[in-house]
Image (tube, rainbow, N blue to C red):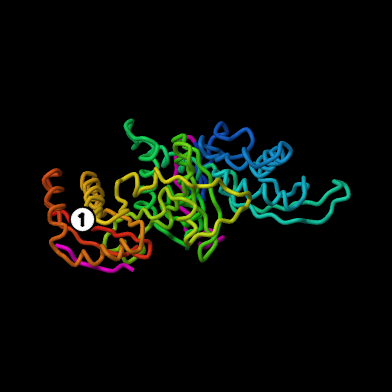
Amino acid sequence: MLCVFMAGCSDRNDRQNVEYHVYSGGSLLDSGIVVPPDNTKNSYADFYIPDGMETDYYRTYSLTDSEREIYYDTVKNLGRLKETVTLPTDSAVYGKILEMIRIEQLSFNNNSTWKLGEYSAAKQGFDVIFTYRLTADEISSMNIASERAAKDIIAQLTPSMDDYEKLKFFHDYLVLNCATDPEDEYSDTVYGALVRKKALCEGYTKAFSYLCNLAGIENVIVTGKTNVPHMWNMVKLNGNWYHVDVTWDKPDDELHKKYPDVILYQYFMVTDSVIKNNHTIVDYPVEPPKAYGTEENYFVREGADVTKDGELLIAAENAIMDAVKNRKTSAMVKFSTTDLYLTSLADLDNEELFTPVIERVNAECKENIGLSWTDYYGQYRILTFIINYS
């Protein structure tokens, strides 16, 4: 049966109701925080830094040798939780370097803030004052928990998966398993997304970057704006860069409540032109790479793009067949033009249109599905099909 139904970043600094995960090998404090053994600490930080928690695009491609030296010295200062250092360069350059550290050093959960202090005659320079919200032991505890959660996700990958399929697995995992929560104080961290399973855009983005690093997929974090300050990812696949915005691929509350495992792909592996429809890229700390490729776009890769008349049923069958084989409850197709999209909407009034598709899917997959659809993402020329299993 075919039917139509419509579906229609902040931060906190308090520390209430904190949940830390306790692991053997450390000592438990009254606060419930695990103090890891000394051998878990890093050579340039007083806390544990897991493998894969450094994303290196900006510092590799955008800094001079002298700036890179300041970058690493600053990482050490922040890793030691130093409260006062001497400004090592122009404050604008230093601010750029600190922003790179914020988005590349994924293990630095202390979220330091900085401000310029008074001029020090003894140091012949201005002091920079840092403040921290977490201790080194707290950061270590969070990083240990995040590492174990990430390894559990990586363990679910199979040898047959290519990099596109790995990226899609990470994307889908975060959409389905992490709730958008502006009230959680760790929503801006990998720990928030992977362990507490509560995040805002920064948490989703950093967790996705961490998983990409563990899988050996080059990536970079992008900062910008939608209607609020925003953050998302770019990944490099087969020589081309693509945007991935996990946050914006989560259905809204109304659709999620009715169909909790629906996943959207409007912002999975897209070009600059697509992301700029409603995202503004801010070239800070520096300009991110350009994204022009379309070969690995979700709809192109899945054969779910409609580029001319007569392709709707073919694209829909491709998407629905793949969804049913993977026991998913939704599938999506995208139209290349508004005219194609509007024409197809008119065609959907014919309730028998998808009968052959349903019959072929049922025969090949040995299922008995029903089908409905929503124009939830109609403004982007996307139809979402809801698959009902009986």
Asked whether, in this view, residue 270 is left or right of residue 159, the answer is right
Q: Is residue 347 above or below residue 242?
A: below
Asked whether, in this view, residue 208 is left or right of residue 159, the answer is right
Q: What stretch is highlighted in magenta?
A: 1-25
Question: Which residue, as the protein is rendered here, is positioned at the far front?
Answer: 309
- What residue is drawn where x is 34% and y is 69%? 8
Main secondary structure found in the magenta portion: loop
Q: Where is residue 370 in the image (x, y as percent from the top left)?
A: 15, 57
Q: In which quarter of the image is the N terminus?
A: bottom left
Q: In which quarter of the image is the C terminus?
A: bottom left
Question: Circle 1 — which element?
Answer: strand
Give the camera-side residue of 28 and 2.
2
Give the camera-side residue of 20 and 225.
225
Q: Position of residue 317 (x, y in %)?
A: 21, 50
Q: Is residue 1 above or below residue 190?
A: below
- Total count of labels: 1
Q: Position of residue 348 (x, y in %)?
A: 21, 64
Where does label 1 land, which residue? 387
Few, some or many C-alpha atoms within 10 Å of disc 1 (few <14, some 14-19, many ≥20)?
A: many
Question: Which residue, as the protein is rendered here, is positioned at the far right?
Answer: 121
Q: What residue type is labelled 1?
A: Ile
Asked whether, in this view, residue 276 is left or right of residue 75, the answer is left
Q: Position of residue 349 (x, y in %)?
A: 19, 67
- Verify whether residue 16 appears in magenta: yes
Asked whether, in this view, residue 284 is left or right of residue 186, the answer is right
Give the camera-side residue of 358 and 56.
358
- Verify whether residue 293 appears in magenta: no
Give the camera-side residue of 111 and 93.
93
